[in-house]
Amino acid sequence: MPAALESLTSLLQRESFEVHTVDASSFVLDLVRGTPFELLVVGYPIAGFDVTDLVEATRGMGSMCQQTAIVIVTHQEHLDGASTWLDRGVNRIIALEWPRARIWQAVCDLLDIAPRVPLEVPVQIRLPADVARDIVLFHTANISQTGALLTGFRSLPFGTRFEFSMTLPEDDVSIRGQAEVVRRTDLDREGLEGIGIRYVNLTEGGREKLNGFIENQLARPA
């Protein structure tokens, strides 16, 4: 998918990243095993190349890229198929039809992964009309300055955007904003059913309040 990767390559080069591009082959598997990269970007689908082989090579024992983020770049029509690798070694799925700012934000989230704090508070979600007309209640399992892990009675499709509000402990004013679903949990590996979300935007004062709470929690003795 050369055209697809060129779109993301130009963004990375603009931010002074050194970008290497290679065709899909067995050489790629040896490359990721022996060379440390900050980010792996994979076009999907690629004829004759199995994403599973790449993930196994990247995450396998002795690989230089065990902790490297993997991003799959695809078209909207292939999102469902690509999303089967989320949390099976792949960290993000990006659709080329998304606005450039949204694509770049997904990459930035991975290059600067925020620490998470365990926290269980209720989260009210107002879904788009084409998904549901009611307000859905979830609970956080953990939160960070960029996103959260939510558990609840239902899952949401990958990429769904919604409005949310949550109230932090010992606070009377809710944090409100917009978020989107970036992954679903792996029940066997993580032991819970839920969705990972990232904040798209927060209302005025919400960002400062959230960041302050997380910084205080991280500063506490273990």
Image (tube, rainbow, N blue to C red):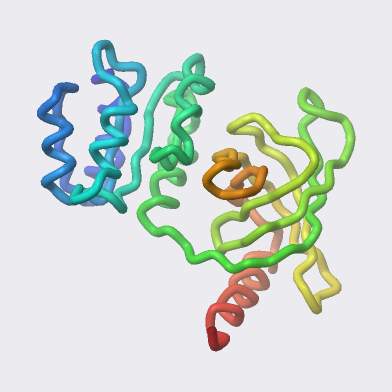
Quick one: quadrant of the C terminus?
bottom right
Q: Is 130 or 221 nearer to us in this picture? A: 221
Q: Is 107 or 48 nearer to us in this picture? A: 48
> Could you say where residue 107 lies in the image, as x and y percent from the top left?
39, 45
Residue at the image point whose x is 47% and y is 36% from the top: 86
Residue at the image point whose x is 11% and y is 46% from the top: 34
95 relative to 10 in the view: left or right: right
119 relative to 36 in the view: left or right: right
Q: Is residue 44 above or below residue 60?
A: above
Q: Residue furthest right?
A: 134
Q: Residue furthest top?
A: 47
Residue at the image point whose x is 77% and y is 26% from the top: 131
Quick one: quadrant of the N terminus?
top left
97 relative to 120 in the view: left or right: left
> Could you say where residue 96 lies in the image, as x and y percent from the top left?
42, 25
> Could you say where residue 90 lies in the image, as x and y percent from the top left?
40, 38
| Residue 104 image-quadrant placement | top left
| Residue 19 image-quadrant placement | top left
- Let me know if residue 200 appears in the view: no
- Let me know if residue 73 appears in the view: yes
> Could you say where residue 55 lies in the image, as x and y percent from the top left?
31, 35
Residue at the image point whose x is 63% and y is 61% from the top: 142
Q: Is 108 or 92 nearer to us in this picture? A: 92
Q: Is residue 109 above or below residue 6?
A: below
How many numbered dots are placed on residues in this image?
0
